[in-house]
Amino acid sequence: MTRPNLISQVSALTPRRRGVVVAVLVVVAFLLAVIFALDQAGEFALAWWWPAAGVASAAVLCTPRRYAPVTIVLVALLTMTATGIAGRPPAIVVAGGVGTAAQLAVMWLGLTRGGTIPRLATTRDVGRFLGTAAVAAASLAVVFSLAAVPSGIEFLPRFLSTTASHLSALLLIVPLVLIDRSRQRVSPWWHTTLMTFAIVVAVVVAFGPVGNAPLAFLPVPLLAWAASSESMFLTVGHVLLAIVLAGAFTVAGSGQFVSTNGLLGAAALLQIYAVAVSATCLLIAAQRVERQELEDSRAAFGRLLRDSFARSRSGFAIIQQADDGALTVMQANGVAGDLLGPQLVADASSGWAVAAGSPFERLLGGADHVRTHESSELGGLLPASRFWIDPITRPGLGRVLLVTVEDLRPVRAVEQAMSAQLERERGISDALRDLTDKQDAFVASVSHELRTPITSIVGYAQELDEELDDPLLREYVAVITRNADRLGGLVDNALRTASSTPPIGARAAGTLDLARLVRDCVADLRHQIDARGLHVSESDTGQNAAVRADASELGQIVSNLLTNAIKFSPVGGELGVAVSASAHHATLEITDDGPGIAESERARVFERFYRSAQATREGVAGTGIGLAVAQTLAGAMGGSIVLSGHDTAGTRATLRLPRADPSPVVSAP
């Protein structure tokens, strides 16, 4: 786990605090410029190191993007002030300011390209940083060296010395604000302490006054070791410590760089040495970070695979076959261990092995391609399961068998539960069918018993009609005959309902006046209406309401609807009967002010033998087939019956039938 680098932390501050940090860095850069310029005072003197370049670059990188040019100009002016204080000529002062501005601009543009916060974490980041720093240092060195040429100073030595001085400062200081710092120690504290002590000793031996032997390489292996074992931040710290100590010894006149005679002086050689060591250690540290991240990613992925392997609901086992044919379990999750356990034995070397001579061993030994097997093939030695064997060969492992096991016990349990449920439902269905058969048999028996007395009533009524001369008595006989015929129709429909055959409907269809038939039905039920003290409100629009139907069957429909309305109306209640006609339909509406029918039950009351909860609770007489027969007869006539609520209480029954040609009209018997 890492913390953001210093630039990221400064960028997260409030604008005022961020400005304070940038101002402090600018002031520090100015003070360092003054100190190191005065250390080498003179018209054309060159400081052996210029740390102000690194601090100034850090200040520019911490500045908000829109204010970066202002910071660059400010630092350039302060640099000119510092070089002027040191007694440099005006041309060199101006060149120093321009070169500093160019150096800072290159660093800013090169490291903040794309508007992202610069950082050092990968080899690519380090390569980009090294290239940008080299170009930035060279840009300043070109300007500064060209300005010194008119004064008789050679360009190349001054260019190399200036580039090395500024580049070493950039490589040693700027990474301190670019590197993400680790929250956890990469190595123990004692390792860091010993490494620091060893680096100090190596620098003292190589550059100290002990001797002038060519041992400048001595600290390099230790710094490289630190880069490969410590965090990148500590690596830069170790390099900075080593270079500062080496520079101090060189300035003091000791070390092998002091006695060198050639194109470059001691300071230039020291800075080139610092550049080489810094670049090498940064690359090594970046590679270590990338390698560590890759290893962490692989380790995390490996843990994820192992967790998935262990927590999978399917069983997985990896079995290795030795040259002698022995089968050893390399890996197996819990499901595989549970399902394959009866076929495994403990093994001292690997933990588990396939039992020798077992049926499972024979299946594994003969597997030459992917095959699917059932646990039943092993003679019932395993729980209900299905498994796949995939043989592969891998270098260093030999023949490996990948076994995938699917636990079928939950599937079998569900199948058994479904089978038991199916048996229960089949039993319930048989019981309901038996009950329905008994109901149908009872209805058929009663209907057959009723047919004989009804036939007798009709016959004697006809005989009586022939013997009577009194009109009133003949009207009474007509009512008896009409209702006896209707009762006969009811019996016939009950028989058809019991035998599950649809009613014939409209066998003797003729054109009937629906309004006249309704009036006859009301007259037939007058005794029941008067017994309950009901007030009947009859409404006829006067329009022709002729329909095509059998008089007995249509009378049965109307009588059933009227009877229901009478039965459920309260004593002294209102009963509405209205006949109307439209262009294509004739409609009968019968309303009552009874308790009504719950909306959830309105569709079910047309089922055979169904009785509403209200009728059952109040003990209203009925068989539950009247509305079923009425709806079936209406459907055979091309019509329908719809039940709905009526105002705040009661029920509205609406019969709609296709309207017929009005002539000839047949009166109801």
Image (spheres, rainbow, N blue to C red):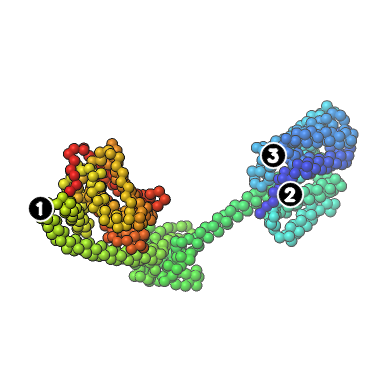
Residues 352 and 595: in front is: 595
Residue position for label 2? 236
| 358 with respect to 474 (left or right) | right
Disc 3 residue crowd, few under 14, some 14–19, many 20+, Cα 10 Å: many
Q: Residue 332 at what x, y percent from top left?
A: 47, 64
What is the three-letter code of the residue carrying label 1?
Glu
SS at badge 3:
helix
Disc 1 designates what residue? 466
Image-based side of 341 in relation to 282, left or right: left
Which amino acid is tagged 3? Leu
Q: Nearer the viewer, residue 452 or 297?
A: 452
Q: Quadrant of residue 546?
A: top left
Residue position marked by numbered label 3 in the rendering: 111
Q: Please report whichever mark, 2 or 3, sits nearer to the chain's N-terminal start.
A: 3
The quadrant the N terminus occupies is bottom right
Q: Secondary structure at mark 1?
A: helix
The Cα atoms of the two marked residues, 1 and 3, are separated by 125 Å
Q: Position of residue 393 (x, y in %)?
A: 43, 58
Residue 182: tell me if it is visible.
yes
- Classify residue 552 as left or right of residue 272: left
**In the displayed structure, does residue 464 sit left or right of residue 657?**
left
Location of residue 384 by image quarter: bottom left
Q: Amino acid at mark 2?
A: Val
Q: Residue drawn 45% across and 68% down?
A: 338
